[in-house]
Image (cartoon, rainbow, N blue to C red):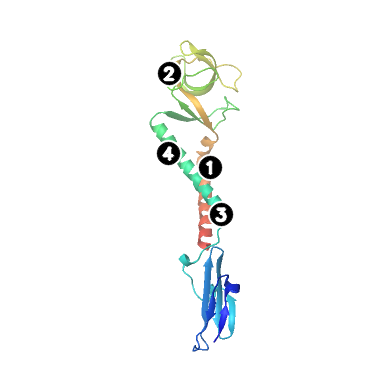
Amino acid sequence: MLTANLQAELGAPLRWVQPSRVNRTAMALVTVSNTQGEKSVLISSKGLMVVDSKNYVLAPKERISKPTNVLRNSVSIGIKVIGWIFVSFLLSFSFLNVTGTVKSQIVLTESMKPAINPGDMVISTSPNRIAPEFGDVVVYSGKRFDGTKVASFAHRIIAGNGQSGFTVKGDNNPSPDTQRPTLSEIEGVVLLTIPYVGQLLNPQIFVLILLSAFGLWLIVDAFRDEE
């Protein structure tokens, strides 16, 4: 009768006792799975041999306890948190835009450099919610002498008031604007600036971002298949 202590090979308090009557060609495969992976021992009439169980049986995925990778888990959690924050921001921003609480516009000129650059997005809210003051960047309706609207400009208030008109100037311009917009001509007070958004809306860059995201997805999916 063959007996064997398997603790040294498998790291578990196991003892093998072979029946007295057994086929000489019979073999037994003993596998122990834990958080560190799995270990296997092949028992035959010739003795014990540490083996890789994959060469003998195909273990179901639910039986195998994979090693815990702290770094991978931390990165995975971090990506999920960032993803949820980003999605929440987009949903909140879309809701505020639809309800008219805020307004978003892409800056096209260099008149406000370096504070605001071409391609940046400015987020503004109605002057009814936040009263424009000295030093604020406001979006106002630029008009011709006949009163027809030309475009919207985002410039800084340097003097004046809402009744007689604000004196506004682009930080990068040598002199103030000719027009002195009144409170009724102020479209919004700028709350924050999001850099480079307008550049990302460029069709070529947008396609490049999509292709990069698709390539990253393929790489992540390949790693999952290997696991």
Q: From the image, state whether disc 3 or disc 2 is nearer to you.
A: 3
Q: Earlier in the sequence, mark 4 or mark 3?
A: 3
Q: Nearer the viewer, residue 174 or 51?
A: 51
Decide: marks 4, 1 in contact (CB < 8 A)?
no
Q: Amino acid at mark 3?
A: Arg
Quick one: 49 or 126, which is closer to the camera? 49
152 up-or-down from 164: above or below: below
Give the labeled residue for mark 3: 72
Which residue lies under the disc numbered 1? Answer: 205
Mark 3 neighbour class, 10 Å CA radius: few under 14, some 14 to 19, many 20 or more:
few
Q: Read off the residue under disc 2.
A: 148
In the image, residue 143 sits, relative to residue 90, either above or below, namely: above
> Are dots 4 and 2 in contact, CB under 8 Å?
no
Tell me the amino acid under the disc marked 1.
Ile
Q: Which callout, 4 or 1, points at the residue further toward the start of the chain?
A: 4
| Distance from Cα at disc 4 to Cα at disc 2 | 35 Å
**Does dot 3 land on a helix, a strand or a loop?**
helix
Q: Amino acid at mark 4?
A: Leu
The residue nearer to you, when weighing 35 against 87, is: 35
**Distance between the Cα atoms at labels 2 and 1?**
35 Å
Quadrant containing the N terminus is bottom right
| Residue 101 image point, x, y percent | 41, 28
Calculate the distance from the C-alpha at mark 4 to the C-alpha at mark 1. Answer: 23 Å
User: On the image, numbered disc 4 is attached to which residue?
Assistant: 91
